[in-house]
Amino acid sequence: MRKLLTSKWFIILVTVLILIVIIGVGFIPGSPVRNLVKPVSGLASPVQGFVKNIGDMIGDARSALFDGIAIREENESLKEQIAQLQYSLTQSEEAAIRYEELKDALHIKDTFSKYDVYGVAILSRDADEWFSVIRVDAGSRDGVDLGSGQAYAVVDVEMNLVGRVIETDATNSKILTLMHESFRVSCKVNEVNGAYVTMSGDATLKKNGLCLLTDINPDVVLEEGDVIVTSGEGGLFPEGIPVGTVEAVDYSDPLNVTATLRPYTDVSQLKDVFIMIPVQDEEGETDGAPDTTESEALR
Amino acid sequence: MRRFPFRQVIAYTVYIILVFCIQVSYSSEMSFMGQIPDLMFVFTVLTAYYFGFRDGVIVGLILGLLRDCFCAPCVTGLDGSLVVTCGIGMLVMFLAASVASAFFTGRMKRNVPFSFVTVAVVTMLYKLSGYVLTVFWYMTVSRAGNAESFTDHIVRSLLPQTGLNLLAAVPLVFLLKFLGPYKRGPAKNREDDKIISGEGNWVTY
């Protein structure tokens, strides 16, 4: 018996079986398996943050040493830009006053007025092409509390779509980026009565930094350079978040017209992102995004 | 009574923290052709190759757990909703360590050139089995998303990843050989997997 228990093959078999059971149980909705590993995440996060800070400090010190001349030139250029922007600002203030007057008169809604936007820093990135969820430093303690069937849109500093929050714990949240094969969102061409399409990640295209557009009506003429924004259908994401531009359209199969899309955002270059959380009204109901299932969210 | 292995625990702890932190914090800086050198995977493979099954699977399971906590795979589940998986990282690392510990046993243990061969072969096995599982998942279970073609996977994923992992193996081999968890020198008999550790001694029981 002792020989069996210490046999390498027996250990491999038992461990593999246990791990397969853990993976299988993890697929059951509401499974507690992920809660079991959260303490590990809580312990490892500060250590990872500490090492990352040291790495960033070394990087900053290196930049301070080698980028001095470039920074001086950039500073001069920025001073000129500030002067120009100051002039534009003065002009815009007058326009803003007029806009507010017209907004009240015409009942114009601000695009994202029903969303609070939380700035968060990216803590950890994908380990390889399959282990590809990003972690950010805000969790339920910071107000990023994901209810069942909900998803929060994640955007970059220019309000371009980055992905969606798929899991939160007390201090961290996990983000699925728009390049991931499992990511799908209903979009439309950004023009009056623009055509509806579905944008999804694609294993092949993502290596070129592209995404896939499907569910394109064959009667619709999509052109290279068309701007694609979220449609807001299903209520998962707010309407009008810029996603990217059409790179190429394939009409070879009239029943399955597809196109490639180049996203505006470059996920690998991002250090900070913004989570859009629907504002809760006084009765505790969310104004911006109603609870919805995955399938409803698409259309 | 066996002495508590302070050196091993400290060395493995430091390396696991370093490897995991660099992997998840600076992956975009290390990226090449859309692939990232997988330091966690390479470290597990090399540990198993040099120091045997027991060390390999312990290191592999710890790194796999951290991988599952920080960057777990996300898949479309049976009901169409997105599921952040748990346990796949541990399974991958455990199997990688098991395979690597079985490589070039006999008279080749601790041979540096063969450690690179091991890294390359285990990486290829990982990428191929990952591809097969992904295609299977898309075709039979999830029915969402598209898997890449096999040729694309070989040219744009397997080969660059193998190359990057071989590059990543260079500093890790150096660390494990010269600043590793075991002292270089006379061999010591370790009963767990019947492997003699010790620089220059390749003979195993």
Image (cartoon, coloured by chain):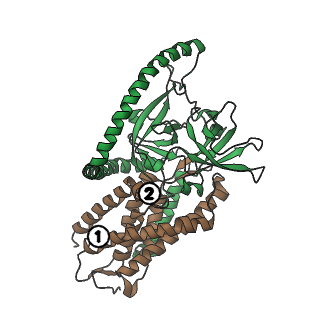
Chain colours: A green, B brown
Label disc, if present, on residue A127 of the rendered structure: 2
Q: Quadrant of the C terminus of chain A?
A: top right
**Which image quadrant is residue B187 in?**
bottom left
Q: Residue at x 27, y 51 (%)?
A: A54
Crowding near the residue tagged with mark 1, few <14, some 14–19, many ≥20 C-alpha atoms within 10 Å: some
Compared across the picture, whether A226 is left or right of A59 comes to: right
x then y, percent, for residue B106: 39, 86
From the viewer's perspective, is residue B97 above or below residue A237? below
Q: Nearer the viewer, residue B37 or A21?
A: B37
Label 1 sits on a secondary structure element that is helix
**Which image quadrant is residue B198 in?**
bottom left
Label 2 sits on a secondary structure element that is loop
The chain letter under disc 2 is A
The residue that label 1 is drawn on is: B175
x then y, percent, for residue B98: 44, 72
Q: Nearer the viewer, residue A237 or A69?
A: A69
Q: Quadrant of the N terminus of chain A?
A: bottom left
Q: Nearer the viewer, residue A9 or B134?
A: B134
- Kindly check if marks 1 and 2 are in contact, taking CB atoms under 8 A apart as contact: no
**Which image quadrant is residue A11 in?**
bottom left
Q: Residue at x 52, y 60 (%)?
A: A20
Tag 2: amino acid: Ala
x then y, percent, for residue A72: 29, 43
Question: Is residue B157 something one can see in this rendering?
Answer: yes
Crowding near the residue tagged with mark 2, few <14, some 14–19, many ≥20 C-alpha atoms within 10 Å: many
Report, in whole angstroms, how far the alpha carbon at label 1 lies from the one at label 2: 21 Å
x then y, percent, for residue B205: 35, 86
Number of callouts:
2
Tag 1: amino acid: Leu
